[in-house]
Image (cartoon, rainbow, N blue to C red):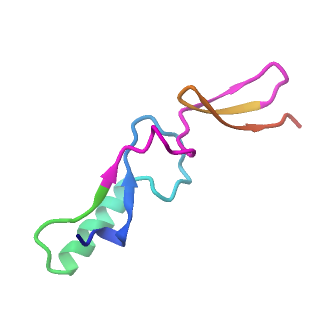
Amino acid sequence: MLCYKDQTFCNAEGCKNTSCSSRLTQQISNDADKWAKDSGLSETPISITDASDYCLGFITHTTTNSFGDTVIMGGERVIGVIPKE
């Protein structure tokens, strides 16, 4: 089936990754609705999933370790570490 931008967008609750290209935002929803209307479609075909279980970019919070480094967390998983300068 044809869907907006031929892409699946993510609506994972609690994700703080604002730079993710798959993140479903209000702007994406608005653009998809406009695309559907301009294409003469009666409904907006958009593919949406919650990718939090497998996405390495799923960020829930950051914390600091005992060395002063910033630790980026995705639920209980460590996604990355930003060393203290």
Secondary structure of the magenta portion, mostly?
Answer: loop
* 62 up-or-down from 41: above or below: above
- Identify the residue at horizontal 21%, vertical 73% (top origin): 36
- Identify the residue at horizontal 31%, vertical 59% (top origin): 29
Give residue 63's quadrant in the image.
top right
Give residue 26's quadrant in the image.
bottom left
The residue sitting at the right extreme is: 85
The residue sitting at the bottom extreme is: 39
Q: Image check: 19 left or right of 69?
A: left
- Identify the residue at horizontal 36%, vertical 71% (top origin): 5
Residues in magenta?
48-69
The front one of 68 and 53 is 53
- Identify the residue at horizontal 38%, vertical 56% (top origin): 9
* 26 up-or-down from 84: above or below: below
Q: Position of residue 51 (x, y in %)?
A: 42, 45
Q: Is residue 38 magenta?
A: no
The front one of 32 and 57 is 57
Q: Position of residue 28 (x, y in %)?
A: 36, 61
Q: Position of residue 17 (x, y in %)?
A: 54, 45
